[in-house]
Amino acid sequence: MKYLNDFLITGGTGMVGKSFLDKLPNAIYISSKQYDLRDPVQTNNMFEEYRPRFVIHLAARVGGVLANMNNLGSFYYDNVMINTNVLESARIFETEKLLSCLSTCIYPDKVTYPLTEDQIHNGTPHQSNFSYAYTKRMIEIQSKAYKAQYGCNFISMAPNNLFGQFDNFSLEGSHVIPAMIRKIYEAKLNNTRAEFWGDGTPLREFTYSKDIPDVSLFLLEKYDSPDVINVGNSHEVSIEYVVSKVQEYFDFDGEIFWDTTKPMGQFRKPSSNEKLLDLGWKAEDYTSMEKGLKETCEWFIINYPNIRGMNG
Ligand code: NDP
């Protein structure tokens, strides 16, 4: 196969995709406006045009709990089509290596912590995002099947919670950190209190999106198995601590109200990075949550209100 480009990144216009721009300035960054990857013909056309040696497959319909719960059917259709088409076209066009992005939120609801890769198919995902989760799990299955039958070198990583610049800051559709940043910033602007669900004690792991390019290139170099591998900063912090940091970066001295009548989710959901560390990655290679959060808050101030998700 004659390759025309080294790297093609699906989902190149998303939060994670944009974080590759510094590291891979010459890569091809794909938006859904150029190619709707739910369509096999458009997906093939994309591969025909760019003929990439390496593909980093990030494109997905992504959202927080509410967005997932309200769109179980369309999240299923969009994601299962995108993933099936991208891997099939990569096979046809003999992509040398393809890295897909799964997520630790697709692990079974009832699982033994920390999340280890061998448990990923051991039970049903949480009911709030089961359709997204099953489509992501099928990437691993498709990669294994394609390795067995065609010898394709398709690998997949499962990051924990990601945050960063270019995130979706919609209050309805977003994840924990972007919602937190927006609520506190707007509480400061409007001189109101910032409200959060629960009591702030649950612990979570957060990874800065700008770490994903480094870990992706590391895996493309060092990892050749279709078995999923966890990635992400596994240092746990409480939700209350993250709120206190955002408060500090925005210099917000108004009231933080914890609504303890609302659900707060599981106390901990730690993931294991052992497999990645065994390959030579170092825990210190991740950016600290504090540094990533500070940079994200600074970016938010500069770009507000022209930020994705502001209408929702
Ligand atoms: P974003 O929502 O920011 O970006 C999604 C990307 O997918 C966009 O570039 C979008 O293109 C593209 N896309 C969506 N639908 C289509 C389509 N039909 N055809 C072509 N492209 C499409 O997501 P993130 O950057 O946050 O996520 C990237 C990956 O990381 C995803 O696979 C996600 O599952 C995974 N992940 C994310 C986590 C997080 O906390 N955000 C955690 C763990 C994993 P366009 O903008 O042009 O429509």
Image (cartoon, rainbow, N blue to C red):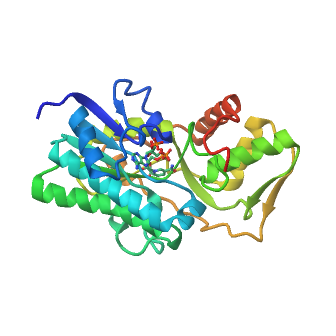
Q: In the picture, residue 134 is in which quadrant?
A: bottom left
Task: Give 64 or 247, whichever is nearer the viewer.
Answer: 64
Left or right: 180 as drawn, with respect to 160: right
Residue drawn at x 55%, y 67% is 69
Q: Residue 54: where, in percent of width, then height?
A: 25, 37
Task: Give 239 or 184, whichever is nearer the viewer.
Answer: 184
Residue drawn at x 29%, y 45% is 42
Q: In the picture, residue 186 is in which quadrant?
A: top right
Residue drawn at x 58%, y 56% is 204
Q: Residue 38: where, in percent of width, then height?
A: 35, 53
Left or right: 123 as drawn, with respect to 99: right
Q: Residue 91: where, in percent of width, then height?
A: 17, 48
Residue 52 makes an appearance in the image? no
Task: Give 46 or 153, whichever is nearer the viewer.
Answer: 46
Task: Give 202 or 295, whichever is nearer the viewer.
Answer: 295
Residue 137 makes an appearance in the image? yes
Q: Is residue 249 above or below residue 265?
A: above
Task: Give the mark count.
Answer: 0
Residue drawn at x 22%, y 52% is 88
Q: In the picture, residue 1 is in which quadrant?
A: top left
Q: Is residue 85 above or below residue 307?
A: below
Q: Residue 198: where, in percent of width, then height?
A: 72, 65
